[in-house]
Image: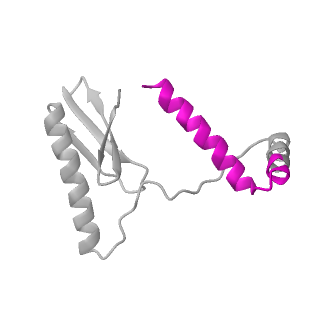
Amino acid sequence: MKNYLVYKDYHGTVEYSAEDDCLFGQIVGIADLISYEGQDVASLKQDFENAVDDYLALCKQLNKEPQKAYKGSFNVRVSPDLHRKLDLIAQTSHQTLNSVVTEALTSYAKQQNSATR
């Protein structure tokens, strides 16, 4: 089950407010705050898509580069022992530490994706 919306490579949350009896969400992975809402799934999707389009139009009007959700780089803090082990794996397999970590994360992501299907 997928509990998020996707439009033009932007991802948005789907939440329910019992107090307001409506669905709402916001685009995740960017610094700008973009929210949307709807009374049902169809209107939530439409408002989400409108919010993305409005954001892109505003960025163009302001001559600002729209933020994309993910740039492909982030810092990871690990224990010195794990760092050492991964570096040894990289050296003995003639790879970079970055490629070893990327392989490990790719494997983990595939595992998680198949577990949630």
Image color mode: one colour
Q: 91 and 37: which one is in front?
A: 91
Q: Position of residue 64 (x, y in %)?
A: 34, 73
- The vertical placement of 71 against 101, above or below, is below
User: Does 100 lie within the magenta span?
Assistant: yes
User: Does 114 lie within the magenta span?
Assistant: yes
The quarter of the picture where residue 38 lies is top left
The magenta region covers 89-117
* Residue at the limit of the structure toward the front, as seen here: 93
Residue 56 left/right relative to 79: left
Q: Position of residue 91 (x, y in %)?
A: 84, 53
Residue pictured at 43% horizontal, 50% vertical: 29
Residue 94 left/right relative to 9: right
Of the 4 image quadrants, the one containing the C terminus is top left
Residue pictured at 76% horizontal, 55% vertical: 95
Residue 95 left/right relative to 12: right
Of the 4 image quadrants, the one containing the N terminus is top left
Residue 100 left/right relative to 79: left
Residue pictured at 14% horizontal, 38% vertical: 43
Can I make out residue 76 in this image? no
Residue pictured at 59% horizontal, 42% vertical: 106
Q: 25 and 96: which one is in front?
A: 96
Principal secondary structure, stretch drawn in magenta: helix
Can I make out residue 22 in this image? yes
